[in-house]
Amino acid sequence: MNSNPSILIVDDEQVVRDSLSKWFREDGFDVSTASSAAEALQQLQGRRWDILLLDIKMPGMDGMELQQRVKEIDSSATIIFITAHATVDTAVKALKEGAFDYVTKPVDPDYLSHLVTNALKQRNLFNENLKLKEQISEFSRADEIVGDSPQMHKVYELIETVAKTDTTVMIRGESGTGKEIIARAIHSNSSRRYFPIVAVNCGALPDGILESELFGHERGAFTGAQYRRKGKLELADGGTLFLDEVGNIDVKTQMDLLRVIETKQFTRVGGNDIIKVDFRVICATNKDLEKAVADGSFREDLYYRLNVFTIFIPPLRERKGDIPLLANYFVQKYARTMGKSITSLSPEAMDTIVRYNWPGNVRELENAIERAMVVGKPPVIRPEDLPYQLTERNHVLPAGSLAMVEKGHIVSILEQNKWNISRSAEILQIDRVTLYNKIEKYGLKKPSAG
Amino acid sequence: MASAINILNASKLEDSRLGELSQAVGRVFGIRTYVTSANLNLDKAFDASRGQCNSTALLAELLNSYKQSDEKRIAIVGIDLFIPVLTFVFGEAQLNGIAAVVSTVRLANPFYGLLPNEDIDFGRLEKEVVHELGHTFGLYHCHQFECVMRSSTYVEEIDLKRLNPCNRCSELLKVAMLNK
C-alpha cells in the first residue's frame, strides 16, 4: 500500500496541472491529474485521495458542482480550490459547502506548502479521531453482558431501543444482577458515549457526604473542605450520571436532585455560582420504590421523573440457561487475569452451579468462580473447588427425594423473605422452632450480603 | 551514470565564484563538473506581465538548445523564475532528467531589503544548485531539517540547510548514480 499522501489535481489548463503535479511529486506526493470534472469523478470511483485541488472555472461541470459530487462519494474529502477568477461570493460558497480553503493563482509557494501540510494534518487528525472512536466502541463492548435466555434477549432489545434516546432509565433488579453493566451498555451505545459515565453509589455514602459528592463544594463550605471540589454532576457533563441504589437517597438530597434533573443547573455546596450541566440520568435500585413512595420515604415527583423507562433484569434463578454461559465467561476472564490454565468446569461442578439458586445472582456466581479459580487445579474446576454452600445443598440429598424437595422449598421461601424467619415460618405454616431445626438439619446458611 | 555536470552561467556571477561553485558541486556528486557560458534565449520564456521567466519553458529551452548527451546541465540565471500556478520558484529541475535551472534573484539579501552579503548569497546558490541537481538524480524532497534536499520556500530555510544530502539521501544518490 502506498503510504505517501495522495493528491488529485483537477484543472482544465495543462500547464497548471503539469506544474502543480511536478511540484507535489518532488515533495513525495502520490499525484494524479484530471482535466475535467468528469475525469476527476471517474478517478474518484477507483480510489480515495487525501487532498483534491480543484479549479473553479472549467468547461462543463465547474469546480463548485464537482465539490458537491465529490462530497457525495467521499464526505471526508479535503478540497482546496485554486482559481484565477476569485470572487468573494464563490469563496464564501465554497467554504460553506465544506472546502478546506480557497486560494487564487498564482499562489505563494510557501503558502501553498503550509496549506497542504495543514490540510493533511487535519485529515490525519480526522482519521485518527475515527480510529479512536472505533477503539472506544471496542473497549465499551469488552465488558460484555452475557446471556442467551429469552429474558436477556428482551433486556438487550430494551437497551438498544432506549440507548439511542436521551430518556431517563430506571434499571430494576435484585442485588448482583448487573445493573451497572446494563447502565454502561446503554451509555456506550448512546450518542453520549464519548463523554464520561459517572457512577454514584447513593447507598454507600452518608447523607451529607452524598450531597457534597453530587454537587461538589466550595472551599470552606464545611469543616475539612480545604479545596473547591467538583461534584459528580459536573463531572458527568455531556455524558451520563448513573445513580446506583437511588432508593437510598435521603429526602433532602432527593429534593435537590429533582431540581437539578429538571433545570439542569445547580450550585456547589457553600457556593453561589450557578453551574449548568447536561447529562443523562440512569438510575438503579433493588428497592420497592412504589412502597417507598407510599410510605413517604421517596418523593413521588422524583419517582415519576426517574421512572420514565424501566428495564427489569431477571434474577439468575429465573434464567438458569445462562448459568453455564456466565460460568464459562468468568472462567475465561479469571484464567486470563490469574494466568491459570483452567479452561472450564467439570460436568459435576457445572451441574452443581446450575442447580444452585443464586440469591446473590451474577455477582455471587462470579465470586464463586473466582474462588474456585484460586483454589482449583488445572485443567477444570471440580465441585470441591466451589464454595461450601453450593456443594452442601446439592450433594447431601439424593436427587428426587422428598427431603430434597422440602429443602429446596425452604431455601426458596427463606430467600424470598430475605431470611426473615418469622415470615418464612408463617408462609411455610410451621412454627419458628421447627424452621430453625430444619435449617440446621439441612445445613442451610444465610448468604452473606452483596 | 552521468559523465559530468555542466554549469551553464547566464548570470552576473564572477568567474572565481563560478570556479568555487563548480568545485563544491563536484565534491557533493563526485563527478566532473565544469562551467560554460549559457547560450539561452531567455525571451522565449519571459512573461512580460509578470516580469519573470517561466522556469518550465526555460527548461525546455535548455533541452532544445544543447545537443543530447549524458551530462547533467544546470543553468544559473539572473532573472526571477515562476511556474504558472506559483508566484515564484527558486529553481526547477527535471525529476530523473538532465536539466535544471536556478535563479540568483531571490537568493540575494538586497531582494529582501537587507544589506548585501555575497558570501551568504553564494552559500544559498550552492545549496540550490545541489538541490535542483539532486532532483535530476531522482531525489525527492527530504524531511530532514538540514538536508540539502529539504524543500525551501524561504531563503531563511535555505540558510538552515547544509550543502550535502543527509545519510538517507546520500544512499539514494549513490544507488541512483550506479544505476544510471
Image: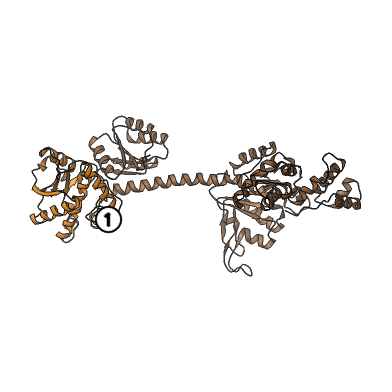
Task: Determine the residue positioned at 57% across, 56% down.
Answer: A234
Residue on which the image places disc 1: B146
Observer able to see residue A365: yes
Left or right: residue A344 versus residue B119 is: right
Q: How is the image coloured?
A: by chain
Query: A294 or A370, which lies in front?
Result: A370
Rendering coords of residue A323 (x, y %): 70, 42
The x, y position of residue A219, in whole percent, is 58, 67
> From where the camera sits, is residue B137 visible?
no
Circle 1 sits in a helix, a strand or a loop, which is it?
loop
- Residue B31 x/y as whole percent: 16, 49
Q: Residue at x 33, y 33 (%)?
A: A40
- Given residues A6 and B43, the one toward you in this image is A6
Figure colour of chain B:
orange
Q: Is residue A278 left or right of residue B11?
A: right
Q: Is residue A195 above or below residue A228?
A: above
Quadrant position of the N terminus of chain B in the picture: top left
Q: Quadrant of residue A63?
A: top left
What residue type is disc 1 on?
Glu
Classify 10 Å Cα crowding around label 1: few (below 14), some (14-19), many (20 and above): some
Front-lying residue, B155 or A227: B155
Q: Nearer the viewer, residue B106 or B163?
A: B163
Residue at x-position 65% and y-position 49%: A180
- Residue A328 is situated, as x and y percent measured from the top left of the image, at 65, 43
Q: Could you say which chain is coloured brown in the image?
A: A
Tell me if residue A73 comes above or below residue B77 in the rendering. above
Residue A20 in which image quadrant: top left
Q: Chain of mark 1?
A: B
Q: How many marks are shown on the rendered structure?
A: 1
